[in-house]
Amino acid sequence: VVKRAVYCAIERGEKEMRMALALLKELQKTQVMDHVQLTKGMGRAVAGLSDLCLDVPNAAERLRMLADWLAFENLVSPSFEQAVQRKAAQGRGAPLTPEAVSMHGTHVAEEYLVCESGRDAAQSIEDLRAGELCADLVCRVLAVSLEKPQRERDMLCSLVSSLVQRGAVECSQAEAGVDMLVKQIDDLLIDVPKAVEYVGGIVAHLLEDHVLPEGFLSSLPLVAGEERGGKIAEVVGGQLKLPLAITAFKAQVKVILEDFFANPEYKETAEQLEALKESRFGHEVVKRVLVMSLEKKDAEREMASVLLSGLTRVYGSEQFFEGFIRTLRGIDDLALDTPNVCHVLANFVARAIADDVLPPVFISLVPKRIVESGRGKEVSALVHGLLDQHGSSARIMNVWGVGSRRSVSELKESVSALVEEYYVEGELEEAVRCVRELGVPHFGHEVVKRAVYCAIERGEKEMRMALALLKELQKTQVMDHVQLTKGMGRAVAGLSDLCLDVPNAAERLRMLADWLAFENLVSPSFEQAVQRKAAQGRGAPLTPEAVSMHGTHVAEEYLVCESGRDAAQSIEDLRAGELCADLVCRVLAVSLEKPQRERDMLCSLVSSLVQRGAVECSQAEAGVDMLVKQIDDLLIDVPKAVEYVGGIVAHLLEDHVLPEGFLSSLPLVAGEERGGKIAEVVGGQLKLPLAITAFKAQVKVILEDFFANPEYKETAEQLEALKESRFGHEVVKRVLVMSLEKKDAEREMAS
């Protein structure tokens, strides 16, 4: 918008230039456009000045005038006016002077402090083609930093490091630029009384980033004189002993990432890194993740890729770009410890592109001298090879192997081997260590199933060993409750096949389920589930009682795993037909003995089962009907049964699982008194917001605000703050439905 408004105004005349000024002022005033976009737009306008001059001979003078007006209104930096003059001189073929390059340094520094784009800064310097005069530019950028607060001083030091990493400035030019700055120390002290301290900080920062050679410190007395140089050297020495901001940050990041690889909590790790409040050093996080992953196995590398994808909420794209480039620049050193570093980094780059962490054209944006020779060239070729393969997206998403970046069959073999070894050797601690070292916490259910089946095939001694192993895995937090519940569910589901090899498998599995329930490791409903499965295997007809017992099991398992898919599959496998009504009744009856949150969860489960087609609407209605008929019996154990059943009916009416006419049938089903009271509760709850109703209302407000002001991170945080992850499907549905009435631009935002 800025570039087009400026160019159109310049092509037309002074009247339109003043209109452009008024427009840009109003866009800023009304916060329709932020300072970053205005600065970027003016930067693009200056960059394209040469082409504009072909059509408008006095374009340079007009753009200079408009830049002057904008600077007067404090909308852009005064350096833009000088940038226009330099660009115009360059277009006339005038030779670059140290003064012109130095002025460009001021412009680069001011623009970077607004936009924080190392890529734009590097491109701007490469377009200048200043050669050895880049030293003057570096000197000016750092001189500008002396007049800024500490945070911006650190940012401009990081910019110089970034320019070196990107190849826009040579190390020797950066060193020469710092040398020029140190030589000016007496003049700098006139305007900046703390210049010695600040210059010392700059030198320390650039030494820390390996932009300056270690010997630079000893040259300071020769460059700045014995007294000044000695003082700067003292400051540098003191700062390098004390942790610099970047040094302290690196140390904190290292601790956080070591903890992450030991205990992969993605959300917690992202929150810890965000809490450091150093987004300008995000490239160091990216680089550290990549470097640490080189020494890990494929499972940990997959974790690293997932973490990088999640960190896009914490750091901007610029930081990821910078982090990958810095890692590629050090590839020769990394190869000393990791011979296959080219393949590993190529996989990381390709995966980051597939995850939208890096742009698809990333390799073309890397400085040519990095990717046109040696190992950098090999990485480039490997990345292109991965991206150009047929079906590359699926391949790249599995670049570390399927599932946990090893094939599922390999994982199963590993699990079988460690379980067999445990039953032979009897080493409990060794078995726990092996499960931990597998590094696949999400595959714990396979460990449970394999341990249970092997024990059942062997005998009671091994069954007690299985109990001890599962207890220890829970106690040491190597395996969570969800995986144990899932594993037992899979063991029960496959009981029919196991009985072909072990005739008394059902009795043994029932016994083991009983022991686990006694230790509070699984729900008591597993014992009943085994009995039902065994009866089903013998061809015994399903009874309402058996289906009802399965409902208890489904409810208890769902409260642990929160997997509507698993619950639906379990019910479909049961093939209960019309008896699904008994199952629904039982699930809801279980909810009456639970706290409000779990009651809502089980109501949502019934809605989910209907949506997934595992239960018919008519069966769900019949199940609620059965529950209401039992109200007198329910009141014996649950004094608030009327209130709770009313809440269930209200919830299912709200979710359109029950027909609207159901409310009027309550007095007929439960009797005039009880039915009337339940109907009153339902009526009251439908007037007051239910949990789901209140949630929907809050989501609607948040999403309306989002479509008016698309702040992605803020919107995600607001939704997360509602603490209703069990209703996430309502957010998804609301986003989709609201998008139907929008234009394609808003639909892109929704995606």
Image (cartoon, rainbow, N blue to C red):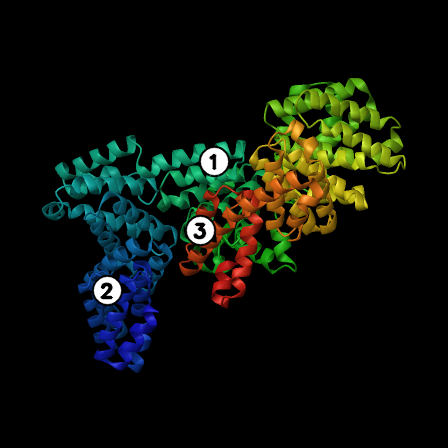
Percent across and percent down for residue 706 are 43, 56
Q: CA distance from mark 2 to mark 1?
A: 42 Å
Percent across and percent down for residue 398 are 63, 48
In the drawing, what numbered circle is on residue 257?
1
Q: Specify whether 689 is left or right of 16.
A: right
Q: Secondary structure at mark 1?
A: helix
**Residue pushed farthest front?**
672
Residue type (three-letter) at the residue carrying disc 3: Thr
Residue at image x 31%, y 75%? 7
Residue at image x 31%, y 38%? 245
Q: Specify whether 252 is left or right of 501.
A: left
Percent across and percent down for residue 58 are 23, 79
Residue at image x 35%, y 58%? 122
Q: Which residue is mark 2?
A: 80
Q: Is residue 123 above or below residue 471?
A: below
In front: 423, or 525? 525
Percent across and percent down for residue 269 are 47, 37
Q: Which residue is mark 3?
A: 715
Q: Specify whether 218 is left or right of 250.
A: left
Residue type (three-letter) at the residue carrying disc 2: Phe
